[in-house]
Image (tube, rainbow, N blue to C red):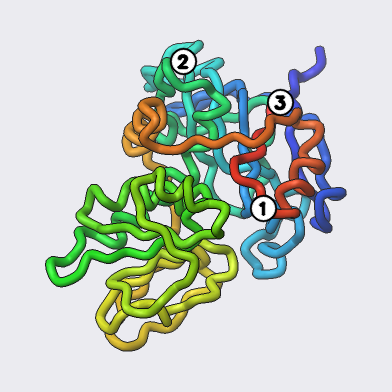
Amino acid sequence: MSTPTFRAAVVRTPSGPDSIEIIDIPLAEPGPGEVRVAVAAAPVNPTDLGVVGGFFHELGMINQPERTGLGWDFAGTVLAAGPGVDLTVGTRVAGVVLGFDRDFGTYAEQLVVPAADVAVVPDELDLVAASTVPLSGLGAAQIVDLLGDAPADGNRLLVTGAAGAIGANVATLAPDRGWQVTGLARAADEQFVRGLGADFAMEAEPGWDAVVDTTSQQVWGLTPVRDGGAFVSVRPNIVPAAERGITVNVLVTQSDGPRLGQLLAHAASGRLPTRVHAVMPLTQAADAHRAVAKGGTRGRYVLEP
């Protein structure tokens, strides 16, 4: 009798979108504390483009002799639960698979993940929209944790890339900690940024009490931050050296099922933006990567197995 399998997207020798392969992987049953999920939706993240292009292999962050799995966040339905798990079959969940050095990811028909890392998707939120929340939502929430409460002597926060997925979520969540947010983005994004409740800017003028740079190139560095202010980067490999008494932190996103549950509730109520540009089949993952690489798109490309 043949072993059941499922399809997943991987790269063996990363060289851009054409190196993405769809392969069959033997089905695994969940162990203690794990669930097996039928993936309904998996967004394409900029990080995936770096994996497929070999960027993280070159940095030494990936050493996978056979294959590297693609995809970070997902939403789907529980198919099976291991011992000690109270999620029932059929429960709609979302979660994130973190780390670079792995042979599977969320670009797959199924996956087995720790139950503690997933959260139940509210009935009001469809699974495609829910899939866009885990990575950018948890990242934004943890950036706000790094900032902490706004100090009494200055609460002006500049968020660069405020029209992007993480930036928009930071702009939404930071006021809960007392920050007065200004979002930096292109002129075409002004209405969206103001709709988040933030002020709007197109230039990173100096003097901000804190700056969160969610852009891929981190071009401004600490220049916009006042002496003694705070700076948070989203790129571990591009972190400016601290100067002028500025506190410098870098985001390293962690799984957090309970926190994800809160973020999904915010998304269901419309508080957190969930923007989907296009939904494409898993077999067109390479086309989705090419489209994301062109840039300029607001909203996520989401793959459906």
Identity, as a three-letter code, of the amino acid under mark 1:
Gly
Tell me if residue 47 comes above or below residue 157 in the rendering: above
- Locate residue 194 relative to residue 7 in the image: left or right: left
**Residue at image coords 81%, 12%:** 1
Identity, as a three-letter code, of the amino acid under mark 3:
Pro
Q: Is residue 224 visible?
A: yes
- Nearest to N terminus: mark 2 or mark 3: 2
> Nearest the camera: 23 or 280?
280
Quick one: label 3, few (<14), some, or many (20+) residues within 10 Å?
A: many
C-alpha distance separating marks 2 and 3: 18 Å
Q: Secondary structure at mark 2?
A: loop
Q: Secondary structure at mark 1?
A: loop
Residue 233 placed where, x, y %? 45, 67
- Nearest to N terminus: mark 1 or mark 2: 2
Q: Secondary structure at mark 3?
A: loop
Residue 190 placed where, x, y %? 48, 53
Residue at which label 3 appears? 305
**Residue at image coords 80%, 56%:** 14
C-alpha distance separating marks 3 and 1: 25 Å
Identity, as a three-letter code, of the amino acid under mark 2:
Thr
Pair 1/2: label in front: 1
Quick one: label 2, few (<14), some, or many (20+) residues within 10 Å?
A: some
Query: Residue 265 occupies which quadrant of the picture?
Result: top left
